[in-house]
Image (tube, grey):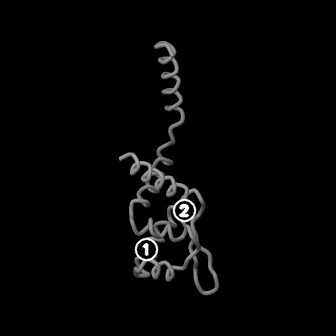
Amino acid sequence: MSEQNFEIEHQKALHNLKQNLPDNQDLEAMVNVFKAFGDMTRVKIILALSETPLSVGEIADTLDMSQSSISHQLSILKQLNLVSNARRGRNIHYRLSDQHIITIFNQTKEHIIEDDNDY
């Protein structure tokens, strides 16, 4: 590619970048999701829920934590639409809102494994 062609393509890419950046509201939502992923307890909850819907008590037992701390973390995850809940008899069971969440985790794991293999 000639220098002139590179410059033309580069300017097009810059123009497209400016046109396609998410607005601040969407960016803020993205940042909040990544903040949620920045807490080990919430990551453990998401990984547990990727296997099966669980009640607060089941999550607490699985993670060996108090129900109140699990409820607090689930509240944060629910506000961010990362988990949803449904009543099953006397219990409320939580589940991941969609598979995109676990896709992010799987890609992160692949990235870590790839980085480990580079050394």
Q: Would you call the spot at circle 2 few (<14 residues within 10 Å), some (14-19), or many (20 or more)? A: few
The structure residue drawn at horizontal position 60% and vertical position 59%, both measured from the top left corner, is: 99
What x and y, as percent, mark residue 63? 43, 77
The structure residue drawn at horizontal position 43% and vertical position 61%, both measured from the top left corner, is: 36
The tag on residue 2 is: none
Q: Pick whichever, 88 or 1, lies toward us.
A: 1
What x and y, as percent, mark residue 64? 41, 80
User: Hey, which residue is sitting farthest left in the picture?
Assistant: 119
Amino acid type, mark 1 = His
SS state under label 1: helix
What x and y, as percent, mark residue 8? 51, 17
The structure residue drawn at horizontal position 54% and vertical position 36%, both measured from the top left corner, is: 20
Quadrant housing residue 95: bottom right
Residue denoted by label 2: 81
User: Hey, which residue is sitting farthest right in the picture?
Assistant: 89
What x and y, as percent, mark residue 15? 51, 26
Amino acid type, mark 2 = Asn
Which of marks 1 and 2 precedes in the sequence? 1
SS state under label 2: loop
Marks 2/1: CA–CA distance: 15 Å
Q: Would you call the spot at circle 1 few (<14 residues within 10 Å), some (14-19), or many (20 or more)? A: few
From this view, report whether residue 33 is shown above or below residue 48: above
From this view, report whether residue 6 is shown above or below residue 20: above
Q: Are marks 2 and 1 in contact (CB under 8 Å)?
A: no
The tag on residue 72 is: 1
Q: Count numbered badges in the picture.
A: 2
From this view, report whether residue 95 is shown above or below residue 38: below
The structure residue drawn at horizontal position 44% and vertical position 67%, both measured from the top left corner, is: 42
Quadrant housing residue 54: bottom right
